Image (tube, rainbow, N blue to C red):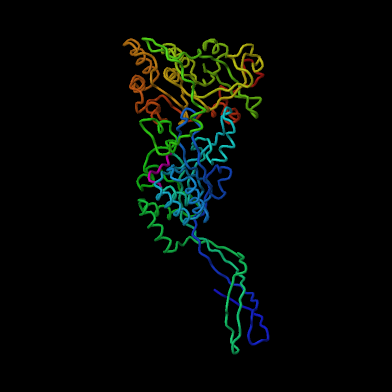
Amino acid sequence: MRLAGLKWLNDSRLLLAALAAAFLLQFTLIAEAAAKKAEPVLGDIDRPMQFVIVRSSTPACEPLCPEWIWARGEITAATPKAFKRFLKKIGKKRLPVLVSSPGGSVDAAMAIGRLIRERKLDTGVGTAYLTGCAPTEKDCLAKQKKSGVYNGRITLGGAFCNSACPLILAGGVNRIAGSAFVGVHQITTTYYQEKIFYREKYKVVKGKKKVVSKKIVSRKRVGTYNSTDLPKALERQMLAYLKEMGIDKTYFTISQGVPAKDIRQLGPGEMSAMKLTTVSDHAYVFAGLGRCTQHQLSENCIEDLDRAVSTKEPVPAVVSSKTPARVVAPPMRFAVVRSSETGCEPMCPGAISAEAPVLLAQILQGLGGRRLPIVLRSPGGDADAAMALGRVIRQHGLAVALGKTTFSGCGPGEADCHAGEGKEGQFLGRAGQYQNYCASECALVMAGGTRRFATEESLVILRYKGPEPDPALKQRLAEYLIEMGVEKMLLTVALGPVGSDFDPPTLAQMYRMKLATDTRDVDTLTAANTCAVLSGPDSCSSPRTQNGL
């Protein structure tokens, strides 16, 4: 609405040019869902949404690994154009979209959802943890920046999709939320009040002014106000979008019934009923190790030819033999490890590294009853020995977590290694997810844990590598699994054909077999803040204690 206009004219009958300064108060309608934040807020989650490609950092999958699009941040009016440019850049790749957002513009969210559906992509709620590069990879960081593909893994910790964000989730062909927080509330319409300055050119003909041009010089926002009265036009647009995406209109009814200042979490049953989700699983499935096997190759499995060359192992010479040769790995080694992470002293977590010649029983005896978690990584070995280890672990009430131990300085397998060794025979180091695996008979050791920690990044191969076990060994294996409370399905898969559906198993399948009981990774047990956060875990001690680590 134009309020006033002031003009200055020349004396001439024909005005060639004149400057007009005026202002116009204009109300611009922009529909947005106010961004109600869930705690904890993750770093730059309030910044405008950004898009990156993340590649699974599990080295066992190379050179064919799952990749996904990570969309994180606030949904702004500029986000659809940015996403469209991003999709054009990645070409014909059909990667699932992993989203975590506090919300933002409703119109922009629907536009992004349509772009996702147009490309026939899957969506899920979750976030990513960028793991950086392996120390052995040359110029890894530079390559990631240049390619736009970053190493990482999917995590649900702190992931949420609130306000307008579920409209992006709705765009997926297959839609997953799992246990992530998905929150809704009514739409808030924001009206922006602007003062507009413009320049006019006009001429005077026979005493009358005639405008020949009008140009806006500048704009200045002078105020805003919000309203929860949803315009009918926007209501029709939303209902049309939900119908287009196959989402029941109960989503609209529920969200509009929640005050804008509040947020209401949608339960898994609700989301399934309204068809906001189509798969009752977690976003971990986008990066599951089983997605890129020969019998199940998903579209987001991307081959990295550079890594195919760099990770290829030398081919051993062929030896003629009637009996198939079996690869012999170094004997399993045990060592007590105290966290070398900064920030934990004087109370630091410890763990027992079981990687590949000190007996476990001797180490446990020297701990004076302390119960440290076993950080396990092994290519397998003797089945009876594995079951014996599992029983020792269970007898002492220890937890087992799959992971790799990296020693600070030298490790226990090196001759004359004293630099990193503590006074009580402990080594400094840290445990992590990188390059962790548990193959064949290793699963029997894992089964001995009172709690068994594994994630989607854990590579567990169940296939039995040795010759066909005799009936007596099969019986011992079956009895052991019953003793440990693990389903006999594990034995069926282990003795089944190569490439069976459960080898390698997904995290959900490990849960079904009761091989895994906890989805937290090894970092949870050995991180620097573990002793501060947890209430006196057995793995924490001060170096001043008699049996301290």
Q: Residues in magenta?
A: 172-178
The residue sitting at the left extreme is: 471
Q: Is residue 329 above or below residue 278?
A: above
Locate the N terminus by quadrant.
Answer: bottom right
Left or right for 37, reference 447: right
- Snapshot quadrant of residue 192: bottom right
Left or right for 214, reference 401: right
Instruction: Identify which residue, 266 or 319, lies in the foreground.
Output: 319
Q: Position of residue 281 (x, y in %)?
A: 40, 37
Dominant SS in magenta: loop
Count of numbered circles on the image: 0
Q: Position of residue 273 (x, y in %)?
A: 35, 46
Instruction: Identify which residue, 395 or 411, lies in the foreground.
Output: 411
The residue sitting at the bottom extreme is: 206
Q: Position of residue 528 (x, y in %)?
A: 61, 29
Residue at image coords 50%, 54%: 81
Residue 146 on the magenta span: no
Locate the C terminus by quadrant.
Answer: top right
Left or right for 352, reference 345: left
- Snapshot quadrant of residue 447: top left
Residue 173 on the magenta span: yes
Q: Position of residue 34 (x, y in %)?
A: 51, 54
The residue sitting at the right extreme is: 11
